[in-house]
Amino acid sequence: MAMIDEILSEVPQAYAEVKGSDKYPDIQGWVYFYGANGGTIVLAEIYGLPDEEQQYLGRFFGFHIHEGSTCTGNRTDPFADTLIHYSPGYVQHPQHAGDLPVLLSFYGMAWMVVYTGRFRPQQVVGRTVVIHSKPDDYRTQPHGNAGEKMACGEIKEWGSQLSVNLIGI
């Protein structure tokens, strides 16, 4: 088995640049997907989350992979085209492959690393990652009562088109 420091020293196999909706323009960040031991390490670094009320305590936000391929939508849901949670087996929530742990902000920042065996990076390329306004309750059907979609990123294969600096881990 590869160790996490070895895996994270490599370039990720996929990534998403996350941007907030017009209502949440300060949200920005990156999500990286590393193939590891038959699954995926998901690493998120997000900034500009709205936690003004109790910054020192932080705030929880829902965080999911969605089926849709684009961060577009309409007036009532700017990310409507992200569709439902990624669930190739069409199982009940919270067993969707795209159900991830919540993000915890601290002064508007959230960093999270999680390992999942529910998908490989190649399986989520062409899908979207979404940040929701409320924490997922991991019970309510079909999407955990996670609230509005605040920010979104389109998951792309790592390639020569990317011009970002990897975070220093």
Image (cartoon, helix red, strand yellow):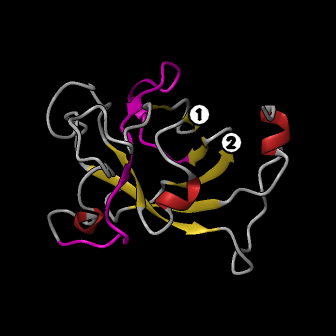
Q: From what the image shows, is residue 5 above or below residue 155?
A: above
Where is mark 2, residue-wise?
36
* Residue 91 location, quadrant: top left
Residue type at numbered disc 2: Ala
Q: Return the residue nearer the eye: 25 or 15.
A: 15
Q: Secondary structure at mark 1?
A: strand
Q: Is residue 48 left or right of residue 133?
A: right
Q: Is residue 12 left or right of residue 52?
A: right
Task: Please give the range of residues in magenta.
Answer: 47-74
Where is mark 1, residue-wise?
115
Q: Residue at 26% of width from left, 25% of height from top?
A: 137
Q: Residue at 43% of width from left, 23% of height from top?
A: 54
Residue type at numbered disc 1: Tyr
User: Magenta stretch: dominant SS?
Assistant: loop
| Label of residue 15 in the image | none
Q: Residue at 43% of width from left, 34% of height from top?
A: 51
Q: Is residue 10 left or right of residue 57?
A: right
Q: Earlier in the sequence, mark 2 or mark 1?
A: 2
Q: Return the residue nearer the eye: 81 or 123.
A: 123
Crowd tier of the residue under label 1, counting other residues whose Cα lies within 10 Å: few below 14, some 14–19, many 20 or above: some
The alpha-carbon separation of the residues under discs 2 and 1 comes to 8 Å
Q: Secondary structure at mark 2?
A: strand
